Image: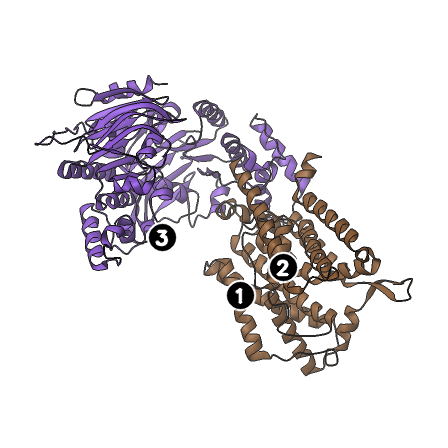
Chain colours: A purple, B brown
């Protein structure tokens, strides 16, 4: 049997003492489509960077066609036939398509001068070999994502790679563009090029790959031909346990209380119309629907960001007018945005500052901030949310995605919020943290009778945590059902039926 | 045609043309050959320094230390010449250029190795070098009588010499040739060498440039050292042309350089810019200053005009970049 194209043997990688990869072995045969699956933070990108020579493994060895490669650098990895298409393509938006295509080959030729005719010829050949149409003189930044991806693929192919690594190639593509991409990938395979396809999308993995290797917390937890896998077994391998079947049951409070929030015929031009539903104290209600269904606009209305809405909103039995964010906060509404990095956190500031950001007014009743009390409360919340950090004065950007999300949620819990609107609460959070965040939310809801509106596309997340799910479609409320008696697949079918 | 119209060089050329016509209409003296020659001469120093700023800006950095490096390199060189009674021309320029280059290396060290923000680095090194120059090297002006004569003779070389109708001599300084030659060299580097394309690549996306195999350390060092070297050269040429070596001179002109480069279509965020654009930008700036003088506008108001130009040009390019990013 010929030696494999590339073989990783017992690779370990530490970053400042933190284990990113623990004894990873991986074999890729020539011309194979191999899928590397795993949650965020499972070590997928570290493996890519080790194969492509960006990182040096702490321990272990890499073999190309059976020959050990020592001190791999990005350049020597390329000469071994490794090409990586990063998620952001690593292209230059300010240069033309032809220059983007020809740069690497010009560089590796070791020339000091640019031969522009050569650049154009090289670029034309590269594009022709892919059988696609691209304007070579266009500035790259003016192309759509799928066009830029074609340029990235064409560029990678120019060095006649034997292994093409694609990092989450389908993230920004439409379904049709994904099909075009897959057709291209199979064609490349026909030319004998092996593809390492990095993804966390179950369906795409099963569609395209021949071998699937699953990583969890820096370890290989399963590897084998595609036939051995199905969606459930991949999920199980990725998260380490069966997807939980436990659901949250809402207990009505002992003495009757008015609904935490009640919407009556609320409409927003261009967003949604005639929305009516109520959230009881201690209830977690899921809100789902396709992008553009109006769900995000509804969430933003509740947080005072869409003041032009019409209809009645009642909080704790009182009519309110949510004309701006300050007013929404004053009425006890808290909003955790989807894009927490840009909308929710001050990345360079400390954990404590981030936690306290909405509590300073409460802590400064006399006009001056009581820092001793603020520190005590922040420490308490760090403990309560189980945020893993050496101390509260570390900047938030040093935390993992899961811990960052705990900081955002913790901030709102400190601000006496009574209605928590969570938009994609665990998007981009690894599975371990996800379960922890869910448990925390449920515990807090049970204890303090706040109400939660959880916006999510993640069906298991909705079914496990919510006592009720509300579906929106094209700006209208189309369904409202309790989760006690539905299965995850029934909810998934309801969502699919919306298209 | 539309591609030509979209180029920022074309736009600035048209604006320049309009400015020339307007100033000429306001004051016909502006169109006299003597004034045009002196305008061209006034491009030389700002232009050479702006070329360095352009290179750094394309790479994604910024260099505001240029005028201070120019004065330091110049002053040390002149003092050395006076001490040793040196009579040549070539070597002093080499020395001044080398001092500038070394100072540029200082910028590169802080920017690349220490990974500091270029704005802070060059603000710091510029201020530091100026302070060191005035505090340690000296503060006294070296005037016409003490200046090495051969430098003045060299800088007075005329390319064209003719008799005006009123009998006065009109001449075009040969230093314009040096400027044009340096501009051609920088253009060649930017457009036809790998390190030049590396500057654009790095300015467009530093991480992507590194991944593509560019040596970003070398490119960073190249940009700041070239900028420093051009500054050192321009410094000595400046005092040779103005017959006065004043270590306090040119302070504050970093704003003019930035103005010219940004006006010439370079992006303050890196990755865009051309020598032709910068040359047009420099000409535009010199023309504005010159017109304001001819129109008897005081120098303080000229600073207002320069500040306005920087803000307007930056706003236009920022808008252009944002639109490109949105597309």
Which numbered marker is on residue A381? none
Q: Quadrant of the N terminus of chain A?
A: top left
Seen from the viewer's position, the closer of residues A215 and B308 is: B308
The residue to which callout 1 is attached is B106
The residue to which callout 2 is attached is B256
SS category of the residue bearing label 1: helix
Seen from the viewer's position, the closer of residues A119 and B111 is: B111
SS category of the residue bearing label 2: helix
Query: Image point 71% across, 46% down: which residue?
Result: B13
* Left or right relative to A417: residue B166: right
* Left or right relative to A137: residue A74: left
What is the chain identity of the residue bearing mark 3? Answer: A
- The mark nearer the N terminus, 2 or 1, is 1
Task: Let me know if residue B65 appears in the view.
Answer: yes
Residue farthest left in this picture: A254
Tell which tag, 2 or 3, sits nearer the viewer.
2
What is the chain identity of the residue bearing mark 2? Answer: B
- Label 1 close to label 3 by CB (< 8 Å): no
Q: Quadrant of residue B150?
A: bottom right
What is the chain identity of the residue bearing mark 1? Answer: B
For mark 1, does the 10 Å Cα neighbourhood hold few (<14), some (14 to 19), or many (20 or more) residues?
some
Task: Let me know if residue A242 appears in the view.
Answer: no
Q: Are marks 2 and 1 on the same chain?
A: yes
The residue to which callout 3 is attached is A348
């Amino acid at each position: 049997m010929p030696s494999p194209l590339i073989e990783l043997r017992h690779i370990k990688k530490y970053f400042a003492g933190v284990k990113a990869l623990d004894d990873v072995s991986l074999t890729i045969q020539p011309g194979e489509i191999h899928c590397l699956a795993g949650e965020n933070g499972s070590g997928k990108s570290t493996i890519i960077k080790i194969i492509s020579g960006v990182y040096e493994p702490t321990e272990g060895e890499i073999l190309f066609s059976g020959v050990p490669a020592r001190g791999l650098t990005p350049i020597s990895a390329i000469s071994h036939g490794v090409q990586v298409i990063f998620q952001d393509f690593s292209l230059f938006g300010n240069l033309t398509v032809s220059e983007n295509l020809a740069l690497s080959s010009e560089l590796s030729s070791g020339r000091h001068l640019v031969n522009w005719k050569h650049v154009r010829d090289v670029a034309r050949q590269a594009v022709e070999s892919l059988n696609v149409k691209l304007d070579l003189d266009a500035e790259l930044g003016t192309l759509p994502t799928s066009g830029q991806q074609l340029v990235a693929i064409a560029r990678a192919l120019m060095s006649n790679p034997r292994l093409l690594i694609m990092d989450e190639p389908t993230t920004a593509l439409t379904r049709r563009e994904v099909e075009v991409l897959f057709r291209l990938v199979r064609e490349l395979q026909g030319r004998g090029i092996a593809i390492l396809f990095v993804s966390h999308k179950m369906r795409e993995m099963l569609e395209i790959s021949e071998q699937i290797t699953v990583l969890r917390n820096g370890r290989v937890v399963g590897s084998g031909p595609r036939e051995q896998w199905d969606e459930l077994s991949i999920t199980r391998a990725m998260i380490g346990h069966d997807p939980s079947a436990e659901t949250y049951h809402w207990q009505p409070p002992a003495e009757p209380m008015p609904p935490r929030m009640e919407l009556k015929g609320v409409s927003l031009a261009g967003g949604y119309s005639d929305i009516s539903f109520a959230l009881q104290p201690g209830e977690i209600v899921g809100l789902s629907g396709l992008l553009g269904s109006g769900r995000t606009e509804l969430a933003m209305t509740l947080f005072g960001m869409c003041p032009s809405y019409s209809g009645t909103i009642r909080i704790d039995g009182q009519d309110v007018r949510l004309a701006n964010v300050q007013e929404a906060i004053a009425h006890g509404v808290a909003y955790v945005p989807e894009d927490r990095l840009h909308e929710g956190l001050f990345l360079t500031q400390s954990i404590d500052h981030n936690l306290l950001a909405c509590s300073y007014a409460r802590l400064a009743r006399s006009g001056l901030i009581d820092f001793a009390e603020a520190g005590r409360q922040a420490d308490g919340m760090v403990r309560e949310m189980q945020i893993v950090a050496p101390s509260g004065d570390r900047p938030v950007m040093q935390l993992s995605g899961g811990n960052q999300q705990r900081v955002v949620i913790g901030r709102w819990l400190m601000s006496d919020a009574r209605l928590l609107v969570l938009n994609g609460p665990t998007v981009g959070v690894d599975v371990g943290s996800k379960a922890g965040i869910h448990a925390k939310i449920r515990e807090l809801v049970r204890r303090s009778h706040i109400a939660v509106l959880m916006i999510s596309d993640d069906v298991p997340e909705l079914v496990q945590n919510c006592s009720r799910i509300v579906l929106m479609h094209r700006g209208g409320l189309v369904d409202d059902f309790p989760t006690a008696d539905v299965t995850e697949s029934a909810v998934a079918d309801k969502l699919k039926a919306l298209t | 045609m539309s591609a030509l119209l979209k180029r920022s060089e074309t736009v600035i050329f048209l604006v320049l043309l309009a400015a020339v016509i307007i100033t000429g209409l306001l004051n016909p003296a502006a169109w006299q050959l003597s004034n045009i020659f002196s305008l061209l001469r006034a491009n030389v120093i700002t232009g050479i320094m702006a070329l360095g700023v352009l290179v750094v800006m394309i790479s994604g950095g910024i260099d505001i230390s240029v005028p201070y490096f120019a004065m330091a390199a110049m002053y040390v060189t002149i003092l050395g010449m006076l001490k040793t009674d040196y009579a040549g021309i070539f070597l002093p320029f080499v020395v001044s250029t080398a001092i500038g280059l070394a100072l540029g290396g200082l910028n590169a060290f802080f920017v690349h190795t220490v990974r500091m923000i270029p704005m802070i680095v060059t603000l710091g090194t510029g201020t530091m070098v100026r302070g060191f120059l005035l505090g340690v090297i000296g503060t006294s002006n070296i005037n016409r009588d003490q200046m090495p004569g051969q430098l003045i003779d060299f800088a007075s070389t005329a390319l064209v010499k003719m008799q005006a109708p009123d009998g006065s001599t009109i001449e075009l300084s040969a230093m314009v040739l040096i400027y044009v030659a340096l501009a051609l060299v920088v253009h060649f580097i930017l457009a036809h060498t790998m390190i030049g394309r590396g500057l654009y690549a790095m300015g467009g996306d530093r991480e992507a440039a590194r991944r593509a195999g560019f040596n970003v350390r070398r490119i960073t060092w190249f940009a700041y050292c070239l900028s420093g070297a051009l500054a050192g050269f321009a410094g000595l040429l400046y005092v040779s042309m103005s017959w006065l070596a004043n270590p306090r001179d040119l302070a504050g002109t970093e704003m003019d350089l930035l103005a010219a480069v940004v006006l010439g279509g370079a992006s303050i965020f890196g990755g865009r810019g051309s020598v032709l654009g910068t040359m047009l930008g420099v000409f535009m700036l010199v023309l504005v200053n010159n017109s304001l003088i001819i129109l008897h506008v005081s120098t303080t108001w000229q600073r207002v005009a320069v500040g306005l130009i920087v803000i307007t040009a930056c706003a236009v390019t920022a808008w252009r970049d944002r639109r490109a990013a949105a597309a």
